[in-house]
Image (cartoon, rainbow, N blue to C red):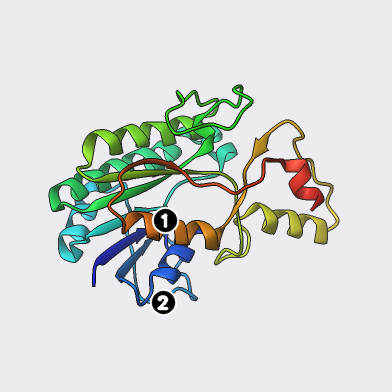
Amino acid sequence: MKKLLVTGASGLLGSHVARQAAGRFNTLGLFQNFRPRDVPGRLEPLDLANAAAVRSKLDDFRPDLIVHCAALADADRAQREPDIARRANVDATAALTQSARRLGAKMLFVSTDLIFDGRKGAPYVEDDPPCPLSLYGQTKLDAEQIVRAGCGAWLIARTSLIFGPSPRGNRSLDEKLGAALREGHAVKLFVDEFRCPITTGDLAAALLELVDSPHTGVFHLVGPERLSRYEIGMR
């Protein structure tokens, strides 16, 4: 049975990846502070930006495959706290990349459609030139470049808005919208920002299939519909 390392195992996406991996892989899920209760298997805390700690943990576990979901994914917070965003999104990816290369592990990095500026109009394809507008998008692009340059066998999976239940119940857009509406708050939603939302279950399944395949390179993994946040909210 292959050894799989999943980062962000307490997060919206990583928890679903770790859950679906149970029984299929010998899995180690890493989390920062919050230990998820409903994720099976081995779970351990780790500061991913601490290169020495990452090296020690990976040398001990020796994964065959890595799915790197952990990130500071709140774009507004990233803009307010750029140092924290770079530590979480860039430094952590660099530490994992170094260990993955040394151990010969295949690494899948989860990126975002926000590395693009949206001005193309038509759907983006994998070889379109990136042009992030936000600091969050820039940190993910910087991390992509680290993975490309530093890993032997690598995958980059760019995704969009992710829908579904999170361990804390407050991470996905649908959870946030539901909570705001239940509390009677007015919700403001963009009509001119379009995304291709995908469910956590579908995305987690695609990531596991991809990382355990012979494929390498960049892939766009998104849902079938192009929707504005307003259209999403009206549903």
**Residue at x 45% of width, y 39% of height:** 85
Residue nearest the viewer, comparing 90 with 83? 90
Could you tell me if the residues under marks 1 and 2 are in contact, i.e. CB atoms within 8 Å? no
Residue labelled with disc 2: 40
**Residue 167 percent location from the top left of the image:** 55, 67
Quadrant occupied by the N terminus: bottom left
Residue depicted at x 28% and y 44%: 154
Q: Is residue 121 left or right of residue 180?
A: left
Q: Is residue 130 above or below residue 101?
A: above
Q: Earlier in the sequence, mark 1 or mark 2?
A: 2
Percent position (x, y) of residue 115? Answer: 49, 31
Numbered label attached to residue 125? none
Dot 1 amino acid type:
Leu
Please tell me which residue is depicted at 24% across the width and 33% down the height of the picture.
149
Q: Nearer the viewer, residue 216 or 56?
A: 216
* SS category of the residue bearing label 1: helix
Q: Residue tagged by mark 1?
A: 207
Q: Amino acid at mark 2?
A: Pro
Q: Is residue 45 above or below residue 100?
A: below
Q: Percent position (x, y) of residue 33?
A: 43, 61
Real-space CA distance between mark 1 and mark 2, rounded to the nearest whole angstrom? 18 Å
User: Who is closer to the viewer here, 117 or 221?
Assistant: 221
Task: Decide if residue 212 is on the left or right side of residue 182.
Answer: left
